[in-house]
Image (spheres, helix red, strand yellow):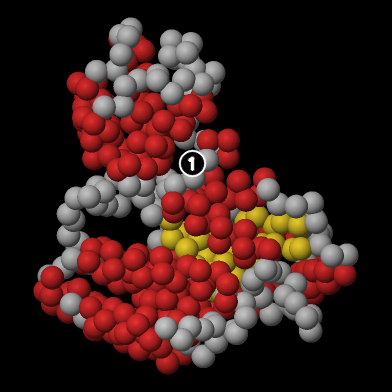
Amino acid sequence: MYEQFYSLKCKPFELMPNPDFLFMSNTHKKAITYLDYGIKERIGFILLTGEIGSGKTTIIRNFIKNLNGSARLSRVNNTKVSSEQLLSMINEDFGLDVEGKSKSRLLSELNEFLIEEYVNKHQSILLIDEAQNLSPDVLEEIRLLSNLETDRAKLLQIILVGQPELKNTLMFPGLLQLRQRINIKYHITPLSYDETKEYIKHRLTVAGNPDAFKLTDEVLEVICRFSKGIPRLINIICDFALLSNFVEGKSEVAIDTWRDVAKDLESKDVLNEYEKKEVPGHANTGTLDELRQETGNIALRLIKLEDAISVSSNGFLREEIKRLEDQISKIASNNDSRNINGYLEKLEEKLVYQILVRITEDGIMSNLSERVSKLEKMLSIAHENIKDNN
């Protein structure tokens, strides 16, 4: 509608996930690296999480677009289903007949199909999107699918993609065996202030005019405050601002237009489906529910770090893990988990290389029962303390 007005060849801020507009922020680069590495090394389970609108679907579409011709993919998007319904969808996506067949028959035929594909040197991949909607029982059934294997290799690689609630569900005690099988875990974080600026410039450039509007510090502050670094919300405010300015017929998008658009979008409850997050570089404190979710996130990250350390002889990193465990107990008293998050991010940077290089060498996801039990107990105590303080 406004493309010609701004000398654009297409709309730069459409909400439809388009791999052509994929912006390689630091967190998105890591997500793609983990996915590529996991598929190349035929790692059994991969977990990818992120907030609504963080770019998960765009990354998935880019991943699918770049799969080699020998890959066989079943992608499941409807996840509010029973285990039998899920199995039917998987088989159907692989091109198998499912009409009138029992669960045991579906499973048998899936196994036969995967063996045949393996013999033909085809890589079979199951990608489950919106996995946060899966019940613990269905997640356990998915774990059982990972038992389909030969003496030499897994017959099916499984990628779980979902919102942060998925990580909390995975912390259920009954899903310990599934957690142990997830070899690669990665959470897509919001864009930083600088990345938000680069993201906007990138999309405008791909659309044909990087100077469609002036991205001043004032404008960027409005966008960051509204979007909290979530790409979809950045798209929403930028698209509305361009449209509003086009309707008014002005040559440039003034700062007042950006402020009015942000205020209008906020009044229409555009943010209701998004969790209130910290604007990059600004403080934020958590409610009881937010802290419960955050401690669950921290637990999963600690597990990943401990696993990396288990194949490392680095005594310093072991000391760091001990310090992190001690800090979990402090969450309830100060109602603020930002320090732990920052500390974790720095430590994770140190361990990325070890994770990528050693993740398949020594079975690092085995023998986690004691550590997981310890973390679950600590989280339970923290949650109780939070409840008492609230």
At a point 36% along the width and 28% down the height, the residue shown is 238
Q: Is residue 103 left or right of residue 230?
A: right
Taking the image as drawn, is residue 164 in sight?
Answer: yes
Location of residue 48 in the rendering, given as x and y in whole percent from the top left corner: 50, 61
Does residue 320 lie above or below 217 as drawn?
below
Taking the image as drawn, is residue 98 in sight?
Answer: no
The residue under label 1 is: 23
Location of residue 341 in the rendering, given as x and y in whole percent from the top left corner: 29, 65
Location of residue 125 in the rendering, given as x and y in whole percent from the top left corner: 69, 62
Amino acid bearing label 1: Phe
Q: Nearer the viewer, residue 386 or 60?
A: 60
Q: Nearer the viewer, residue 150 or 268?
A: 150
Does residue 97 lie above or below 351 as drawn?
above
At label 1, counting other C-alpha atoms closer than 10 Å, the crowd grade (few under 14, some 14-19, many 20 or more) is: many
Residue 195 lies in quadrant: top left
Q: Nearer the viewer, residue 109 or 312?
A: 312
Q: Is residue 4 left or right of residue 283?
A: right
Residue 385 lies in quadrant: bottom left
At a point 76% along the width and 63% down the height, the residue shown is 123
At a point 40% along the width and 61% down the height, the residue shown is 164
Location of residue 262 in the rendering, given as x and y in whole percent from the top left corner: 25, 31
Does residue 330 lie above or below 227 as drawn?
below
